[in-house]
Image: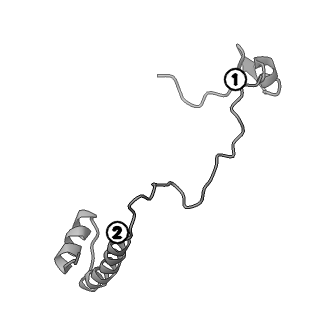
Amino acid sequence: MSLTRDDVAHLASLARIDLSEAELDRMLGELTVILDAVALVQQAPTDGVEPMSHPLPLTNVTRPDVPRPGLTAEEALSGAPEQEQQRFLVPRILAED
């Protein structure tokens, strides 16, 4: 695929980017190199290749999800400076309307 200078100007306008004439010329060359690289990758023989999310075979290394007992309300609130009705009591920062 080949781009024209007008294509680059159109893409820049869609992205709401102001490019000078020199920047348009530079971007035309850079985008052409990128599109050529993508075209080269698309030519790779991929028939029979399974899709993957990572190039290395990774396994999940997390621990099993087993429920364990947590803190009681009293234990959780034991270090709170103030509490009310089994909840942390914090200073009001917004006025009521």
Callout 2 touching callout 1 (CB < 8 Å): no
The reply, left or right, for residue 88 in relation to residue 81 is: left
The reply, left or right, for residue 69 in relation to residue 7 is: right
* Lower position in the chain sequence, tag 2 or tag 1: 2
**Would you name the residue on which mark 1 appears?**
89
Q: Nearer the viewer, residue 53 or 15?
A: 53
Q: Residue at x 29, y 69 (%)?
A: 17
The picture quadrant where one finds residue 62 is: top right
- In the figure, 50 relative to 17: above or below? above
Q: Residue at x 38, y 68 (%)?
A: 45
The percent position of residue 27, horizontal first and vertical second, equals 31, 79
Q: Residue at x 26, y 81 (%)?
A: 24
Q: What quarter of the picture does the N terminus occupy?
A: bottom left
- In the figure, 92 relative to 35: above or below? above
The percent position of residue 38, horizontal first and vertical second, equals 35, 71
The picture quadrant where one finds residue 83 is: top right
Picture mark count:
2
Q: Nearer the viewer, residue 21 or 39?
A: 39
Check disc 2 and give the amino acid type: Gln
Q: Residues within 10 Å of mark 1 (few under 14, many from 20)?
A: few
The percent position of residue 50, horizontal first and vertical second, equals 46, 55
How far is mark 2 from mark 1, CA to CA? 60 Å
The picture quadrant where one finds residue 92 is: top right
Q: Nearer the viewer, residue 97 or 2?
A: 2
SS for dot 1: loop
**Would you name the residue on which mark 2 appears?**
42
The reply, left or right, for residue 87 in relation to residue 7 is: right
The percent position of residue 57, horizontal first and vertical second, equals 60, 56
Check disc 1 and give the amino acid type: Leu
Q: Nearer the viewer, mark 2 or mark 1?
A: 2
Q: Residue at x 55, y 61 (%)?
A: 55
